[in-house]
Each structure stands twice: as structure tokens, then as C-alpha cells.
Amino acid sequence: MSTTAPTAQTLLSIAETDVTTPIPTPTLLPILTSPPFLHIPGTFNSRDLGLLPYPAGTPRIKPNLIIRTASLQGLTDEGAAAIRKLGVKTIYDLRSIKEHETAPDPVVEGVSGVWVKGDERDAMEDVRGFVEGGGEKGYEGMYLGVLGDYRDAFKRVLEGVRDGGGVEALVVHCNAGRDRTGVISGMLLGLAGVDPDIIALDFMLSRIGTEPAREQLLAFAMRGTGVTSVDEPGFYNLCSLRVSSWERFVKGVEREFGGWEGYVTGTLGFSQEELDKIKKNLVAEP
């Protein structure tokens, strides 16, 4: 592991690398071997939400509590050992029915697996919704859809946080660890009162975390959307991460639910007492 973690500014600058342009290995490797990234062999885009570059004196999630990553279908024995070493008690699979049935999560000794049937909506969106601007409107619609389609899975994650006493580590993952995992991660960070710029940075870090699988993911997205070129209108925006897209989505959450707390109490059905317990379990002591 690198001895010096990169700054938030450095991370954001690299995360803004064009999705069609490789991040040079000499730039990439020091980041992937430094916090908040974690090395879990057999997967990618793995990081600890408690190790983000939080500004001094601001709310933060406890380290070694919430781990986010991509699909575990290629998890190696060394990867399983890394998960156990992190003290993970539960893995939450946020993938669709088809994704889960095609490649179920491997069994990790001593770790429980949770998957909840969600909506059957295709993972890939219609690229026409992403043509306008930088695709912000398309992202807002896609992620608001995720809040509906995966509400039961998200509820289970929050129940895990509520019941874990703030000490039981958990893993959340989808396919690329970018969108569905990004939404639940942003929700948890938001509930913890984390600086909005750091929440947006965490969203952007998936550009770096998915770099090892970037070409495969682009090819997968092309097949899923039926496009023949990265330059097809809307497709480039769908594959690109922008702070403006995350901010547009957060405004949508405010408009539709009154913010994250409104979503958790109004849509997921948690009481105010339960919400307070979730927040207490998430937040690190000053």
C-alpha cells in the first residue's frame, strides 16, 4: 500500500479522466493501493467508505464498516480471505434477478449473503435519455428508478446497519459497483451528514475503480444498449461520471422524498428512532 493517500483534489482530477481514455498505470496503481481503495482479489472498484479523504472536523463514516465493491463472481480464495480479514459479517448483493441467477455470489465462510428480488427492469437504460447536456437528466431518472426498484434491498442494508451496532462490517455490491452501489453508498454517506463534496467524490471514484475493467464494461454497455459506437448520442454520457449528474440526482431526491431521511422514513418505512440509530451506528466519534 502507498504510504501517502492522495488528496481529494488529486482523486477528483484523475476521476475526471475521459471514459474513453485509459488512466496510465503509473498513475492508477498508487491510487488503487491507497485509501479509500481496498485490494480484494477477484473483484474491482473496492473501497472503504470510512477511509475517504474527509475534511478535518467533519462528519465521517466509521472505518472498516461499509465496504463497497463490484461483482464477486470472480472472487478468489485470497479475495475471500481479505473479506474475512476485514471482519465482514454480511454481503448484500444488489444485482438484478438475471445477474444474480447467472452468477450467484460465492460462499465466503463465516459471512452471510443477502439478496432480495428487485424489479425486472433491464440494467441498461435507453441512451436517448442521456443526450441532453452531460446526461444529468438521464442520471437523475435512472437513479430515482433505482431507489424504487431496489427499495427492498436497500431496506435490508439499512436494517443491517441498524442491527450491527456500528461494529459489524458489511459489503454492498452490484455488477460494476458503480450505479446501484453508488446510490446506496451516497445514501449512507448522506445519512451520516458527510460533506456533499466528499459524497460526490465517492461517486466519481468509480471512474478510477472500474479502470481495470473499463474496456469490458464499455463493451458490455454497448451490447446492452444496442449501440455500435461510443460516440452514439447519449451513450458517451451514460458511460461518463460527472459531479453534475450526482448533484442533479440529489436534487431529485430532495424534490421527490424530502431528502435521504425522507426516503428512509417515508418510502422504506423506518421510524425516526430507527433512523437515529442507523445514523449513530454509521458516524465515527469526533
Image: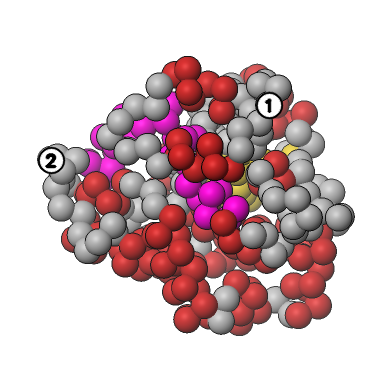
* Quadrant position of the C terminus in the picture: bottom right
Q: What's the distance in space between the residues labelled 2 and 1, CA to CA?
A: 42 Å
**Residue 178 point in image, percent of width and height:** 46, 46
Q: Which residues are magenta?
A: 198-224
Q: How was this image coloured? A: secondary structure
Q: Is residue 172 left or right of residue 276?
A: left
The answer to if 272 sits in the magenta stretch is no
Neighbours of disc 2 within 10 Å: few (<14), some (14-19), many (20+): few
- Residue 4 has which mark? 1
Residue 104 screen position, x and y as percent: 51, 39
Tag 2's secondary structure?
loop
Residue 92 locus on image (x, y percent): 62, 49
Residue positioned 70% across, 32% down in the render: 83
Task: Give the answer, above or below, for where 215 lies relative to 93.
Answer: above
Name the side, left or right, on which 281 lies relative to 98. right
Three-letter code, disc 2: Thr
Residue at 48% over, 54% down: 180
Q: Which mark is residue 228?
A: 2
Q: Which mark is residue 170?
A: none
Q: Is 39 on the left-hand or right-hand side of 88?
A: left
Instruction: Give 209 or 58, whichever is nearer the viewer.
Output: 58
From the viewer's perspective, is residue 274 above or below residue 130? below
Q: Main secondary structure of the magenta part?
A: helix
Residue type at mark 1?
Thr
